[in-house]
Image (tube, helix red, strand yellow):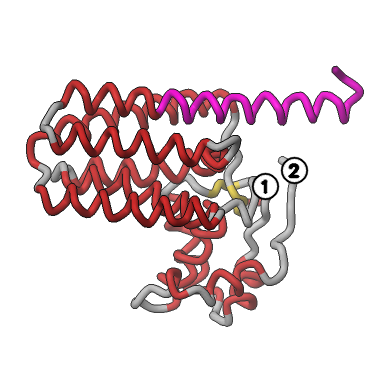
Amino acid sequence: MSETTLPPGVLGSIAEESEVDPPGGARERAYAVLRTAILRGALPAGTLLNEADIGSELGISRTPVRAALQSLLQEDLIEVGARRQLYVRTIPPSSRREVILLREALEQITVREACEVMTLEEIDELRLILIRQRRAAEQGDVERFIELDDQFHIGIAAGARLPTAQRFLEQIRALIRMMGLRAVTRRGRMTEVLDEHEAIVAALEARDADAALGRLTDHLKATYRLIRELDDEHADDAGMRLGGV
């Protein structure tokens, strides 16, 4: 495993944001900050997560940090490396296809069910999310755009009244973000994402499950195509560094 040390100041900066200020205690705060840092890529794969360093950065003791790390370990966002040290998880190619298939299956279930039970008020909330997401795209706010993307898809699961599926989807979407969801911001993709989201909402409002599933499938395929392209580019870059072509 290629090891990276904790970047100085990253956790403290995220902790200052109001959106990462849970009402609970130090454990909840450490968990929220670390999870956000991992999903944003501020702590890349292979980053060593030292309890003392994290505690010093956040101004808390090692005990709540240890508890927060255990929660992240249960979510598979971090992993145990050599000498029982904890690192931000690396998702190998052998696991990426499984993650994508699981997300697709879960979202198909929630979209189909949402067509039956989602209220008009909840559908209106999705439209509000899209308004905020379009504003983020216009402002070039990548992090906000991706966070609202999560809210949109998780909102459909919540409206489907499937809490277990919602929890699984939250975990899977976290892994997808680690795999390169940032690809949605490339080459005008944000505008396409918004159009695809609008089409999904329209199908939900019409209670047309077949149309909603079709729009969802098109949306996921387009996103995964960009993620694969990003993987290929990284592979090419690595090959060039090694003298390859």
Judged from this view, the residue extending furthest toward the right is 243
- Circle 1 Cα neighbour tier, 10 Å, few/some/many (<14 / 14–19 / ≥20): many
> Going by the image, does 156 lie left or right of 52?
left
Residue 160, placed above or below residue 223: below
Residue 56, placed above or below residue 180: below
- Give the percent coordinates (x, y) of residue 221: 43, 23
Residue 141, placed above or below residue 29: above
Instruction: Identify residue type, mark 2.
Output: Ser
Tell me if residue 234 is in the magenta stretch.
yes
Magenta region: 220-245
Label 2, secondary structure: give it.
Answer: loop
Check contact, mark 2 vs mark 1: CB within 8 A. Answer: yes
Labels 2 and 1: the sequence-earlier one: 2
> Going by the image, does 116 lie left or right of 215?
left
Instruction: Identify residue type, mark 1.
Output: Gly
Residue that appears at 41% across and 42% down? 173
- Circle 2 Cα neighbour tier, 10 Å, few/some/many (<14 / 14–19 / ≥20): few
- Give the percent coordinates (x, y) of residue 179: 55, 37
Q: In which quadrant will I find the C terminus?
A: top right
Judged from this view, the residue extending furthest toward the bottom is 59
- Please name whichever residue, 56 or 218, is drawn nearer the observer in this view of the structure: 218
- Please name whichever residue, 196 or 213, is drawn nearer the observer in this view of the structure: 196
Q: Tell me how far mark 2 sits from mark 1, CA to CA.
A: 6 Å
Residue that appears at 37% across and 36% down? 195
Q: Which residue is mark 1?
A: 46
Q: In which quadrant will I find the N terminus?
A: top right
